[in-house]
Amino acid sequence: MLADPQAVTISAAAVTLPRLEERPETNVYSSRADNVDLYVTQKVDKKTGINRATISLVKSTIVTDPITGIKSRVPYSVTRGYAIPLGITSAEVEALDLALQTALSASTYALQKKLIAGER
């Protein structure tokens, strides 16, 4: 189990996320004041033995519909997922994850920016 609380920094602002829920496969860390949630899930596929781990950071913000003027809360998120078959070591997964992080952050995050902008 991860430490309680967790902490993230969003746009240079530190956010403390105490654990608010413990579900069978997911823990939820939340800051209601900052409208930020962190979901950490571990699930093993019983048929294949593949461990699926995900971590999602979700933030909500108020947006105004430009046509109607109605305000509503809209969540947006970033999720990282891992599918780890039996026989694959943590070191192998960490190396693959680091390769992805490096690609996303290279050249002042050019690949990340293109992905977010809709390129594929």
Image (tube, rainbow, N blue to C red):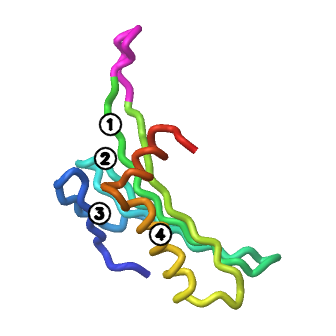
Label 4, label 1: how far apart the Cα atoms are: 25 Å
Residue indicated by mark 1: 61
- Residue type at numbered disc 1: Thr
Residue in view at x 34 percent, y 20 percent: 64
Residue 110 position in % (x across, y down): 38, 51
Magenta segment, which residues? 64-72
Residue indicated by mark 4: 22
Mark 1 closeness class: few <14, some 14–19, many ≥20 residues within 10 Å: few
Note whether residue 33 is visible.
yes
Q: Secondary structure at mark 4?
A: strand
Label 3, label 4: how far apart the Cα atoms are: 14 Å
Looking at the image, tell me whether mark 4 or mark 1 is earlier in sequence order. 4
Asked whether disc 1 touches disc 2, contact meaning CB atoms under 8 Å apart, the reply is yes
Residue 84 position in % (x across, y down): 64, 78
Residue indicated by mark 3: 17
Q: Which mark is residue 35?
A: 2
Which quadrant is home to the C terminus? top right
Residue in view at x 37 percent, y 13 percent: 66
Looking at the image, tell me whether mark 1 or mark 2 is earlier in sequence order. 2
